[in-house]
Image (cartoon, rainbow, N blue to C red):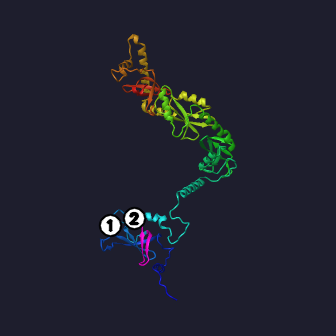
Amino acid sequence: LFFEEPEEEQLFYLMTGESKDTFRKGMLVNARFSRISTPRHRMQGTAFPRIDVRLDNGVLGRIFIEDVSDLLPEHQDPVEAQEWLEKYVHRDMVIPCRIKEINYRVFIATLTSKGSDLKDKQRWEIREDIHDEYLSLSGPTEEEKALLEKDKKRGKQRRRFKIRRVNHPLFKPVSREQAEEFLRKNDSERVIFRPSSKGTDRLTCTWRLKDQFFHFDIVEKNKPDAMSLGKVLVVDGQKYEDLDEIIARYVDRVEDNMLALTEHDKFFEIEEGGSTVQDWLTDLKQHNPRTIPYCFYHSKKLHMAMEVGFIPGTRRVMKEFVKVTPRGFRYRHKDHRSVRALINYFKKHASRPPPEVQRKIQTARANNAAGGSHRQAVKREADRTTRGSSSSSRGVKSESSSRQQRGGGGDRGRTTRYQPGMQVRAFFAQDGQWYPAKIIGQGRQPGTFAVEYQGFPGEYHDLREQDLT
């Protein structure tokens, strides 16, 4: 028998009790801080300091200054590097590291404790001693990344809802995106019922109208169990017995009303790259300033709804929602049975402020009006003005008439064409719009008029002459 002297690597593993599977380049290890040493270079003198550590298996380790941390500033002076390291480490500190190199001859490992190296598995944790023709070291290709991302999305979609036991040919256990894709590929299908991501006490209906997709919730009542379909189904507060009834009495009627509005000559189809609603209405307003141009279009903010855009008196486009229901159209909290009834109501009330603005006017009234005494004073002044103008043959003129002849009460030497009782359009500062109004008399402040907006009797607002037209 001949004795064969072991190589340095074999001797290292024999002495430490480790192996290539437990201690190799790229592995994560814990190192205990020993000291900060500053080696001396024969030619350059004092070099930059390093950290000396000891591993759990007794092997010594070294962390050079450039491998300590990603947050290490660029030191040009070894003294500054020494001071920084003294603040960074302390006695018996355990430092997580990754093995960069192993010197098997002197039993010393070169380590790195930078956070970027600790996280970089692709670079460090591939076995160089194992060769596999099917192993790619370059990572996934762009096509493989796309497939992985698609599988990840599918996994998220599967976790959004639970599989339901619904015995209906139009029910499919799919997500919103999958339902739209199915309807897009199958022209003969227009409705799909699917599980809801909000819980097992409701379903979601997805239906297609031309190129538009609509989604609405169906609340289930009287459920035999959590996964079965409820015996009573509720949509927008209306009760239905089954899914077929929802299609016949809800989806079909809403679709008919939607088609009736989209086929009207006042419907505006929004196309990518085409003109916008604002541009189209502004152009109509410039050609005929005396009219109120308007159009209907699909709403992007509210499902199963339209929006009506119009320019009542200024160049600003106003927008209001029109909800499409099985009974017709709901606009300004009122139901309208047909498109003609909707448009007639809109034309009659377009110049009047919507309910939301009316509430703002009422709020402004509380801030501007000084109470009943002021309203009575304005009314008395208006009465005196009327009596003074009617009795001019007797040479009697009221004080308010004299003020108006001198220029509106506060501006001497000026004449004004606005008189009490005149119908005007007045500016409302709360929303920046103009509304029909009536001049009652002189305001509380010099040079202002007390104005009553149409539809709000007894509510007076002080406006300047430039706020009237």
Against 116, residue 421 (above or below) is above
Describe residue 91's horizontal placement relative to residue 164 as left or right.
left
Against 163, residue 284 (above or below) is above
Which stretch appears magenta?
96-113
Q: Which mark is residue 111?
A: none
Q: Which mark is residue 83?
A: 1
Specify the principal SS of the magenta part. Answer: strand
Percent coordinates x, y for residue 223 in the rendering:
67, 49
Q: Residue furthest top?
A: 393
Q: Amino acid at mark 1?
A: Glu
Describe residue 244's horizontal placement relative to residue 147 as left or right.
right
Residue 113 can be seen, yes or no: yes
Q: Are marks 2 and 1 in contact (CB under 8 Å)?
A: no
Q: Quadrant of residue 404?
A: top left
Q: Nearer the viewer, residue 286 or 399?
A: 286
- Tag 2, which secondary structure? loop
Crowding around mark 2 (Cα neighbors within 10 Å: few <14, some 14 to 19, many 20+) is: some
Crowding around mark 1 (Cα neighbors within 10 Å: few <14, some 14 to 19, many 20+) is: few
Percent coordinates x, y for residue 315 in the rendering:
46, 31
User: Any magenta on residue 108?
Assistant: yes
Q: Amino acid at mark 2?
A: Ser
Q: CA distance from mark 2 to mark 1?
A: 15 Å
Residue appearing at x 56%, y 31% in the figure: 266
Against 368, residue 74 (above or below) is below
Q: Nearer the viewer, residue 295 or 441?
A: 295
Percent coordinates x, y for residue 167 in the rendering:
70, 49
Percent coordinates x, y for residue 200 in the rendering:
63, 51
Q: Which residue is mark 2?
A: 69
User: Any magenta on residue 467?
Assistant: no
